[in-house]
Image (cartoon, rainbow, N blue to C red):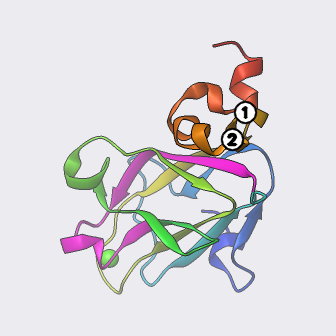
Amino acid sequence: MATDACGPSRPQELTEATGTFGIGAPGGDNYPNNANCQWRIVATAEQNVRVWFTWLSVERTTNCADDYVKVVQESDGTALEQVCGENGKDGGAFDEVEATGSVLVTFRSDFLQGGAGFSVSYEVTTASALCVLPSLAVLCRVHPWGDVGRLQGGL
Ligand SMILES: [Ca+2]
């Protein structure tokens, strides 16, 4: 289990453009009770951050109130995702979420019952110059050509 993220020095700052982090491993022992872990995916106000889960095994409760992984856009505190259960909300597919600027990911567990943990991957991209035009801003959020990195990689 990642240590910095769950200790007094949390959140753990993630400054790489891409990465994966989380707790535990599929099929592993349960994570600790009363865990409080945080990771900050560091990005500028002009950068976009995509976040997706690669696996999830977190105690399922109504509204994911007891144990959960929560993804928050830091600039305005918008909660983009709060998940629990096995492999996604209601057992379905994970939602990929996108934020502007830094993202805070929080994992909490309550005093009983657990799961094997979770893994989150992310990618920080810089919006292309086209996307500063207000008329294109909405399209840029949903189209792959909105990111310089993906443009350079071909459409
Ligand atoms: Ca629990």
Residue with the mark numbered 1: 130
Of the 4 image quadrants, the one containing the N terminus is bottom right
Where does residue 123 sit, x and y in percent of width and height? 66, 42
Q: Secondary structure at mark 1?
A: helix
Q: Alpha-carbon distance for marks 1 and 2?
A: 6 Å
Q: Which of the pair 44/94 is nearer the observer?
A: 44
Find numbered disc 2 in the image and state the secondary structure of the residue it sits on: loop
Q: Residue furthest top?
A: 154
Q: Amino acid at mark 1?
A: Leu
- Left or right placement of residue 69 versus residue 2 in this view: left
**Which residue is pictured at 72% across the width and 33% down the height?**
130
Relative to 141, is 79 above or below? Answer: below
- What residue do we see at 68% from left, 38% from top? 131
Q: Residue at x 38, y 48 (%)?
A: 27
Residue indicated by mark 2:
133
Q: Are marks 1 and 2 in contact (CB under 8 Å)?
A: yes
Q: Magenta stretch: give its range.
A: 46-69
Q: Is mark 2 within 8 Å of ligand 1?
A: no
